[in-house]
Amino acid sequence: MSRLYAELHRPQFHFTAKQNWLNDPNGLVYCDGVWHLFFQHNPNAPIWGDMTWGHAVSRDLLHWEQLEHALHPDAMGTMFSGSAVVDHDDTAGFGAGTLLAFYTAAGAAVKPARPFTQCLAYSLDKGRHWTKFIDNPVVDWIEGDNRDPKVIWHSVSQQWIMALYLADDRYALLASKNARRWQKIQELALPGDTECPDMFSLCDESGAERWIFWSASGRYLLGTFDGAKFSSETEMQVCERGFNGYAAQTWSNAPDGRCVQISWMAGGLYPEMPFNQQLSIPVELKLKGAGAETVLTRQPVTEFNALRGRAVTLENIRISPGEPFIADTRAKLFDVSFKVSRGSSKALYLMVRGQVLAFDWATGCVKFEKGRPHKLGLVEESVDLRSSAASDARLSVRLIVDVTSLEIFVNDGEASASFCYLPDGHVDPLIFYGSGDEQTLEQFELYELKSVFE
């Protein structure tokens, strides 16, 4: 049997649990130089169930140490998703600097069945040990399987705000001065999406503060928030365009005003592995543009560049039918960036470790396929990139490739997508093919990546 973290399908720089099932990231909080990552975990099997909060810590968002589980199922239910904050001003009465975690007690999973409620736990030792609040729940059942409390501190109104999923495509905002007693202040909807809300603010390029209300599938509203009401200024927008990106959350209390996010890469396959499922790489969120034209962008955190090793740098690579470009690497792990001038060509195909990533210039879509280009194959996923100006004559692309996943960032992160895969048979890890007229790859940079376990 392979040693731990060196198994055949083990991601080498994406977070995975040592063993068994993993899904949503939870309780993301930064405290005294440490990034805390909690996650939905089944400690007993490689399938979903027995939800418990796993716990890992890092000082660089790359190298994670998995610790003992933080929250275990109890008489109120299993431990569903939630969030964590630093109570700098001792609003909850446990002491200044206490870490507070808010989670859903999924009571329907226990017998006799109880409704889903929202509960509080606290840590007096910077997240190493957790105590559940004796007077839980802090938010009684409202309706349906209400769940996934995301709590933030709103400095202007000097209160805690909780975003909570209710039912269908509806969410609620609740407010509290002491993190113990909560009052519902608003309901809002994100059409076509459910669960795992997030809420945070960023400044746009004019310097104006804008608030983002986010849901599980990577859809979001952009607007204002005054402590009593979120007012949307845009129609619903889409940030995560891959079918494997889900339940993303941002870290609270992040240093230097950063907004750092991580998501569950749902639906990956890891046959005969001791673990099941992985998280994305951490990404940094920013706003591009101003006013009604503002969009949310995502790019890999700068810390990720520390994994770069051998580099391959080229200029103006011409690609035409019958003349593919084969990248000079045999690496399984790599970070590749390029700009492409498509001209009047029809499509650009990338064979990535035996998988086909197809840029269809006519539709503005990216398709992640199995099979060879120009032959019949099963189209696994199609991602619409048109709102990211993919129809422009020149496009910038960055791909992050791990053992079982690929993440793509287009036009400086205006569009991004997460894909999971199992590699097919191949000799060359990266090949470019063209369809139609000649097209040019500009500023091609490939970095072979080191494993975080080296």
Image (cartoon, rainbow, N blue to C red):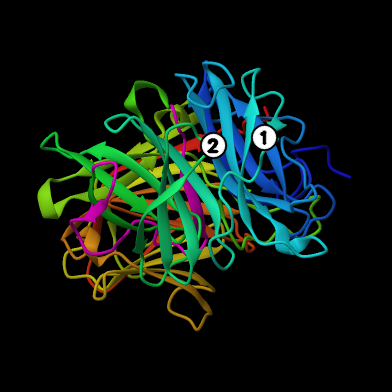
Residue 393, x across and y down, in percent:
16, 60
Q: Which mark is residue 133?
A: 1
Q: Was residue 231 drawn as part of the magenta stretch in this picture? A: yes
Q: Dots 1 and 2: beta carbons under 8 Å?
A: yes
The residue at 64%/19% (across/down) is 124
Most distant residue in the right direction: 1
Q: Point out the tag, 1 or 2, that comes first from the N-terminus.
A: 1
Visible residue check, residue 331 = no
Chain part drawn in magenta: 226-253
Horizontal side of 32 relative to 213 (left or right) equals right
Magenta portion: prevailing SS class: loop
Image quadrant assignment for residue 71 = top right
Residue 428, x across and y down, in percent:
54, 54
Image quadrant assignment for residue 82 = top right
Horizontal side of 434 relative to 21 (left or right) equals left
Nearer the observer, 316 or 361: 361
State whether residue 256 is above or below residue 319. Answer: above
Nearer the observer, 129 or 292: 129
State whether residue 114 is above or below residue 180. Answer: below
Q: Which mark is residue 180?
A: 2
Q: Which mark is residue 155?
A: none
Where disc 2 sits, the SS reads loop
